[in-house]
Image (cartoon, rainbow, N blue to C red):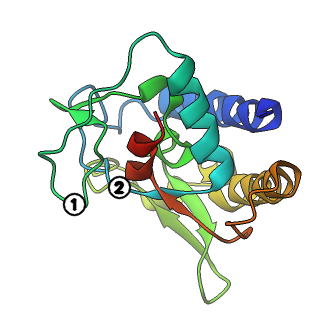
Amino acid sequence: MEFRAYKTLRNDIDTLSNKLEEQHKNHMMCKAGCDLCCMDYSIFPVEFYSIVEALKKGEKKPVINSNNDESSCIFLNNHKCEIYEERPIICRTHGLPLLFMNEENGWELSACELNFTEFDMEEFSEENTFPQDKFNSKLFLLNKEFIAKSKLTEYSEFDLIPIKEIAKHI
């Protein structure tokens, strides 16, 4: 399967995420060992199958943590992500100030409760936040195209797959 467009989007997200991490480094507590946000998220099929393919090709297979509670990610071992290089997009933006449209069509800001504790929230702008809706829209469209091309008829463009299901495919 072809994942070039997905990986390009992922690289664009990493570039912006790295820029924002550098810009906000004095206010972010995210570092190795912090796993407050490592949950069993559900992801689009395009991400799911891209991760599966990469993990199958990799020399080192991830260790599955069956001791984690149901809501935690099965790829989290000793506070370390087993699939860090291939982690989903949602995991690539954790901790950053995320700007998104809420249900009342107003802009809302979200950030980890450990970050930005000594920061004036009024200082956030479009230039120093992650535009979550913009990238989620691009991901949605890539997923829609992926489903059509790959003929994965068991999925609709709105279906999401729990990350833990990756373990059954690698």
Residue 67 at least partly seen: yes
Q: Position of residue 16 (x, y in %)?
A: 65, 34
Whether residue 128 is visible to the viewer of this picture, yes or no, is no
- Residue 149 versus residue 158: which sits nearer the camera? 149
> From the viewer's perspective, is residue 62 above or below residue 127?
above
- Which structural element holds mark 1? loop
- The answer to whether the residue labelled 1 contacts the one labelled 2, judged by CB atoms less than 8 Å apart, is yes
Q: Position of residue 101 (x, y in %)?
A: 64, 74
Q: Residue at x 68, y 66 (%)?
A: 155
Q: Identify which residue is drawn at 61% across, 66% down.
A: 100
Q: Tag 1: residue type?
A: Glu
Residue at x 53%, y 42% (from the top left corner): 88
Of 12 and 79, the residue lying toward us = 79
Q: Is 59 drawn above or below residue 54 in the view shown? A: above
> In terms of image quadrants, where is residue 102?
bottom right
Q: Nearer the viewer, residue 86 or 1?
A: 1
Q: Earlier in the sequence, mark 1 or mark 2?
A: 2
Q: Amino acid at mark 2?
A: Asp
On the image, the x and y values in percent for residue 156 come to: 72, 70
- Residue ranking furthest to the bottom: 104
Q: Residue 14: give x, y in percent of width and height.
A: 61, 30
Dot 2 crowding, Cα within 10 Å, few <14, some 14–19, many 20+: some
Instruction: From the image, tell me which residue sits under label 1.
Output: 70
Quadrant that contains the N terminus:
top right
Q: Quadrant of residue 15?
A: top right
* Furthest-top residue in this view: 59
- The reply, left or right, for residue 105 in relation to residue 86 is right
Rendered image: mark on residue 40: 2
Q: Nearer the viewer, residue 106 or 117?
A: 106
Residue 34 falls left or right of residue 110: left
Q: CA distance from mark 1 to mark 2?
A: 8 Å
The structure residue drawn at horizontal position 37% and vertical position 50%, both measured from the top left corner, is: 164
